[in-house]
């Protein structure tokens, strides 16, 4: 009878807990995550400061990785995501200061820009030009600039929802609609000249 009571007590205890993943959080100390979230810690470096937030993160690939982007400012982030309670307890090293590389892309002057034709010099691991819209469909913002290739993946390193039509490419200034139009014009001009001969 005692074994039955202990077994029932154990079953009740296990079923009464929601099993939420707990993570260290920069603001709240320890917090319960949503079912689709993991624990995360990020070591961020931008032009002015370094910052190390901890907390729960959606769409967070497990393990360590670094990503970088230059739109509406430049930022490089080293992140660690894990799926056991309180696993984001250790600090991460900040990413190195990024040096200029050979890639240049078009970028937006600010978040409300309709035209993104500002020249942006890419840094460090930023090996793609990117353009598109980020955010929810009703409140999406146009952006363009430089990014590391893992920012361009469907489940991207930043955890940002990119709207349809967001593109990445690997050559300088390839993230402009004018580039595509100019290539089509040159192709048509070549075909006309070829046909005329």
Image: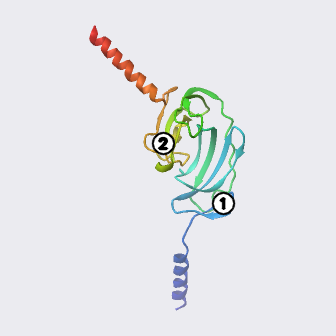
> Could you tell me if the residues under marks 1 and 2 are in contact, i.e. CB atoms within 8 Å?
no
- Picture layout, residue 78 above or below residue 14: above
- Picture layout, residue 36 above or below residue 61: below
Q: Is residue 60 left or right of residue 181?
A: right
Quadrant of the rendering where the C terminus is positioned: top left
Task: Please tell me which residue lies in front, 166 or 26.
Answer: 166
Snapshot quadrant of residue 148: top right
Count the numbered circles shown: 2
Q: Disc 1 and disc 2: Cα gap in Å?
A: 27 Å
Instruction: Say which residue appears at 48% left-offset and 47% top-offset.
Output: 155
- Picture layout, residue 165 above or below residue 32: above
Q: How is the image coloured?
A: rainbow
Q: Secondary structure at mark 1?
A: strand
Task: Please tell me which residue lies in front, 111 or 91.
Answer: 111
Instruction: Say which residue appears at 53% left-offset and 87% top-offset.
Output: 3
Q: Which residue in the protein does label 1 denote?
A: 24
Task: Please tell me which residue lies in front, 194 or 100.
Answer: 194
**Residue lying farthest to the top in this orientation:** 197
Q: Position of residue 82 (x, y in %)?
A: 58, 55
Dot 2, crowdedness within 10 Å: few (<14), some or many (≥20)? few
Q: Which mark is residue 153?
A: 2
**Residue lying farthest to the right in this orientation:** 49
Q: Position of residue 27 (x, y in %)?
A: 69, 59
Q: Is residue 136 left or right of residue 27?
A: left
Mark found first going from the N terminus, 1 or 2: 1
Snapshot quadrant of residue 108: top right
Q: Is residue 97 left or right of residue 72?
A: right
Instruction: Say which residue appears at 51% left-offset and 84% top-offset.
Output: 8
Q: Which mark is residue 73?
A: none
Q: Position of residue 167 (x, y in %)?
A: 46, 37
Q: Secondary structure at mark 2?
A: loop
Q: Position of residue 89 (x, y in %)?
A: 67, 57
């Amino acid at each position: 009878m005692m074994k039955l009571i202990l077994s029932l007590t154990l079953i009740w205890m296990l079923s009464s807990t929601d099993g939420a993943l707990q993570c260290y959080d920069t603001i709240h100390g320890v917090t319960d995550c949503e079912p689709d979230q993991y624990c995360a810690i990020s070591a961020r470096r931008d032009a002015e400061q370094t910052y190390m937030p901890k907390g729960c993160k959606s769409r967070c690939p497990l393990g360590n990785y670094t990503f970088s982007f230059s739109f509406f400012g430049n930022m490089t982030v080293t992140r660690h995501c894990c799926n056991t309670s309180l696993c984001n307890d250790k600090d991460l090293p900040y990413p190195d200061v990024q040096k200029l590389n050979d890639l240049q892309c078009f970028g937006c002057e600010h978040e409300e820009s309709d035209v993104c034709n500002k020249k942006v010099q890419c840094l460090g691991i930023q090996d793609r030009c990117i353009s598109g819209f980020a955010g929810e469909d009703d409140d999406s913002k146009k952006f363009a600039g430089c990014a590391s290739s893992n920012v361009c993946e469907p489940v991207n390193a930043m955890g940002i929802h990119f709207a349809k039509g967001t593109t990445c490419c690997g050559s300088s200034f390839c993230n402009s609609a004018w580039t595509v139009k100019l290539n089509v014009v040159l192709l048509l001009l070549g075909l006309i000249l070829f046909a005329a001969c």
